Image (tube, grey):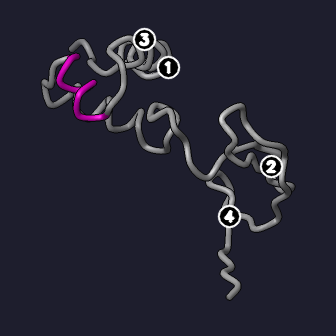
Amino acid sequence: MIHTSEIECPHCHSNDLVKNGKSSNGTQKWQCNSCKKHFRLDYRYKAWEAGTKEKIIELTLNSSGVRDIGRVLHISKDTFCAVLKKNAKNQPLFFDK
């Protein structure tokens, strides 16, 4: 029995993909020929999954604590702080009026 699945680029949603080696933990890496970006289908490190940064910002705005967010998202508090620091340079969370 053969199973096939359509894989699409998470950035541009194109199906024009090629295999691009394997990571150190053995997961397949892919490259999109349309936008030339690299990605993996599954990540072991939770901080790299799509939507994690948005969840961190959302939980921060809802007054969740650093340790609480780390427990809920299964990431370290240092990762949480790094995401907030990077986001603060690009898009401040709070505005002065």
In reply to whether residue 51 is colored magenta, the answer given is: no
Give the label, 2 or 3, closer to the camera: 2
SS assignment at label 2: strand
In reply to whether residue 72 is colored magenta, the answer given is: yes
Residues in magenta, as a range: 66-73
Tell me what residue is drawn at x 76 percent, y 43 percent.
Answer: 37
Say what amino acid the circle numbered 1 marks: Asn
Residue 27 position, x and y percent, is 67, 45
Residue 1 position, x and y percent, is 68, 88
Residue 63 position, x and y percent, is 13, 24
User: Mark 4 and 3 residues: CB-CB less than 8 Å, in contact?
Assistant: no
The circle drawn on residue 85 is: 3
Task: Give the mark nearest the N terminus, 4 or 2.
Answer: 4
Please determine whether, in this image, residue 27 is positioned above or below residue 18: above
Say what amino acid the circle numbered 3 marks: Lys
Task: Give the mark nearest the N terminus, 4 or 3.
Answer: 4
Say what amino acid the circle numbered 4 marks: Glu
**Local crowd at mark 2 within 10 Å, few (<14), some, or many (≥20)?**
some
**Local crowd at mark 3 within 10 Å, few (<14), some, or many (≥20)?**
few
For mark 4, what is the residue? Answer: 8
User: CA gap, disc 2 to disc 3?
Assistant: 29 Å
For mark 1, what is the residue? Answer: 90
Task: Give the mark nearest the N terminus, 2 or 1.
Answer: 2
Tell me what residue is drawn at x 20 percent, y 18 percent.
Answer: 67
User: Mark 2 and 1 residues: CB-CB less than 8 Å, in contact?
Assistant: no
The circle drawn on residue 31 is: 2
In this view, which residue lies farthest toward the left?
A: 63
User: CA gap, disc 2 to disc 1?
Assistant: 27 Å
Left of 5 or right of it: where is 71? left
